Image: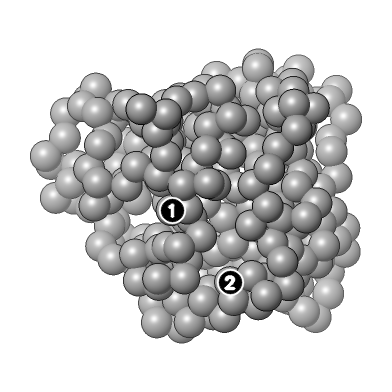
């Protein structure tokens, strides 16, 4: 992984709430990650979360399930995925972008638009999660070329500075988010086409979407969401198991090293 950053890249991320990393994985790393993701998905079957978690999240036949194949927390069942997403150098890079002193994994997930898959509506990430932070962020790695034809990402630059925690489900109306944020309607989106092995990083409050897959081939990606060290429980279950939620009270620090390992800290 190329985790080197320039000051210009840090400034771009801070300003836009997103950044595209053109040379992130080598060809060998890309092939290794593709293999690991395929193994993890095969092992999980229809269950969406690996290694425990919210057992209600199972693949069905809803509109959302036809947006992408989604499997979460592969790091808990695959050592290769764990090696990449718990890499301290990656953690340090993400901390530099976010301007924070420590970071924990929230969850990884593979998002694979199947042939003729539905578009992904505009949405924010962090409001879904069990903590709120203006410094949460995700990395999105292209395992296949992501094009306009097969459902690449789109970012609304600067939206992270205006967003609150109002959000929508990913449904059939791709512009529902703009009912909460009409000011987003006038932002020109960044079209995040990427070659396989490239990556995008975006803030958890940056509005983003993806087009439909208008091809007979899958568009695979592997992503990972991270939370700042010291983030607190907001009462939402998200990926947490019933047992974990029962042990938590609102404002408890989410510092369970088994569920959310510390990836990097300045101290």
- Position above or below: 232 against 141: above
Query: Which residue is rendered at x = 80% and y = 27% of the image?
Result: 8
Quick one: label 1 or label 2, which is nearer the N terminus? 2
Element marked by disc 1 = loop
| Residue 48 position (above or below residue 12) | below
Few, some or many residues within 10 Å of mark 1 (<14, 14–19, 20+): some
In the image: residue 63, left or right of residue 120: left
Mark count: 2
Q: Is residue 159 above or below residue 217?
A: above
Image spot of residue 125 (x, y percent): 54, 39
Residue at left 56%, top 37%? 94
Q: Is residue 11 visible?
A: yes
Reading the image, the residue beneath label 2 is: 33
Specify the quadrant that holds the C terminus. Answer: top left
> Disc 1 marks which residue?
86
Q: Is residue 172 visible?
A: no
| Location of residue 131 in the rendering, given as x and y in whole percent from the top left corner | 37, 31
Secondary structure under badge 2?
Answer: helix
Residue drawn 29% across the image and 56% down it = 54
> Could you tell me how far apart the alpha carbons at marks 1 and 2 are, in whole angstroms?
14 Å
How packed is label 2: few (under 14 Cα within 10 Å), some, or many (20 or more)? many
Q: Does residue 107 appear to the left or right of 68 in the view shown?
A: left
Q: Residue at point 62% right, 30% down?
A: 97
- Looking at the picture, how far across and down is residue 86, in whole percent? 43, 53
């Amino acid at each position: 992984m190329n985790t080197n950053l320039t000051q210009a890249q840090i400034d771009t991320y801070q300003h836009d709430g997103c950044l595209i990393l053109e040379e992130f994985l080598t060809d060998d790393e890309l092939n290794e990650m593709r293999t690991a993701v395929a193994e993890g998905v095969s092992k999980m079957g229809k269950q969406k979360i690996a290694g425990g978690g919210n057992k209600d999240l199972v693949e069905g036949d809803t509109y959302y399930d036809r947006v992408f194949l989604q499997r979460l927390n592969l790091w808990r069942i695959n050592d290769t995925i764990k090696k990449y997403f718990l890499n301290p150098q990656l953690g340090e890079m993400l901390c530099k972008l976010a301007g924070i002193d420590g970071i924990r994994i929230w969850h990884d997930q593979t998002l694979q638009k199947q042939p003729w898959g539905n578009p992904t509506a505009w949405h924010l990430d962090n409001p879904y999660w069990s903590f709120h932070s203006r410094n949460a962020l995700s990395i999105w790695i292209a395992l296949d070329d992501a094009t306009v034809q097969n459902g690449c990402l789109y970012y609304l630059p600067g939206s992270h500075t205006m967003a609150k925690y109002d959000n929508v489900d990913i449904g059939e109306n791709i512009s529902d988010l703009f009912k909460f944020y009409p000011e987003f309607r006038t932002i020109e989106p960044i079209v995040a086409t990427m070659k396989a092995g490239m990556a995008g990083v975006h803030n958890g409050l940056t509005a983003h979407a993806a087009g439909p897959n208008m091809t007979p081939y899958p568009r695979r990606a592997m992503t990972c969401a991270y939370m700042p060290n010291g983030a607190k429980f907001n009462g939402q279950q998200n990926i947490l198991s019933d047992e974990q939620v029962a042990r938590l009270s609102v404002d408890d620090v989410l510092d369970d090293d088994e569920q959310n390992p510390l990836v990097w800290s300045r101290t």
